[in-house]
Amino acid sequence: MKGNILFFFVGIIIIFALNVNFGQSKVKKNKNYNIKISELKKMKKTESEWKRVLSAAEYHILREKGTERAFTGEYDGHFEEGTYVCAGCGNKIFESETKYRSGCGWPAFYNAIQGSVTEYEDNSFGMKRTEITCSRCGGHLGHVFNDGPQPSGLRYCINSVSMDFKSKSKEEAQ
Ligand SMILES: [Zn+2]
């Protein structure tokens, strides 16, 4: 009889301990799971979701790798102090200090913010070019060429439509 009671208590303790462990691992898993889902929702949208959140021009350039007409972009001749961010996801991609007048018809920068853009070989239209996309959402930004000014010698040739501009003076005022 005594043995049975002891067995009963040990059993309850084991069940209780297992439950606590189960409870904790459940919470942990759910937490991680939630973070991943929210990140995925932010960065990896389906094409129909992108269509909903982007304008027609933004969708064409960011998602279909289009190019705006030369000398027509909002930021071609734009030289305010601030930061250029991806129009698709808000990722900071270029600082105004690296923007220069290249005369090529599109906004040009000699450097990108480190880690913000990804390079791909682009052999479309019979040309050998290096495509630049946003590292965060994969949106097409433009191309990078080796005819830029020092110190980098690079020219990031970027569509205005692919970017939004955050003015430094406005940021400071907020
Ligand atoms: Zn982006």
Image (cartoon, helix red, strand yellow):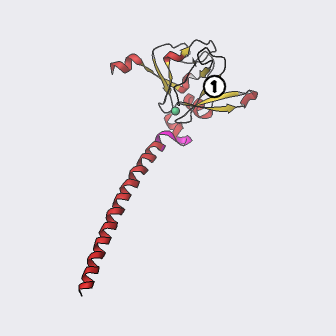
Q: Residue at x 28, y 74 (%)?
A: 12
x, y percent for residue 34? 41, 49
Relative to 157, is 140 above or below?
below
Q: Residue furthest right?
A: 126
x, y percent for residue 68? 61, 23
Label 1: few (<14), some (14–19) or many (≥20) C-alpha neighbours in 10 Å:
many
Give the camera-side residue of 129 and 152.
152
Q: Residue at x 59, y 34 (%)?
A: 63
Task: Give the quarter of the figure containing the C terminus.
Answer: top left
Magenta residues, start to end: 40-48
> Would residue 11 appear left or right of 59 to someone viewing this image?
left
Relative to 35, is 115 above or below?
above
Residue type marked 1 = His
x, y percent for residue 57? 57, 28
Q: Main secondary structure of the magenta part?
A: helix
Residue 42 inside the magenta-drawn segment:
yes
Res. 5 image quadrant: bottom left
Res. 4 image quadrant: bottom left
Total marks shown come to 1
User: Is disc 1's CB within 8 Å of ligand 1?
Assistant: no
Res. 99 image quadrant: top right
Give the camera-side residue of 12 and 126.
12
Question: Considering the numbered disc 1 on the image, is that residue within a helix, a strand or a loop?
Answer: strand
User: Dot 1 corresponds to which residue?
Assistant: 143
x, y percent for residue 167? 42, 18
> Would residue 41 appear left or right of 58 to someone viewing this image?
left
Residue 171 inside the magenta-drawn segment:
no
Q: Residue at x 34, y 61 (%)?
A: 23
Task: Give the quarter of the figure containing the N terminus.
Answer: bottom left
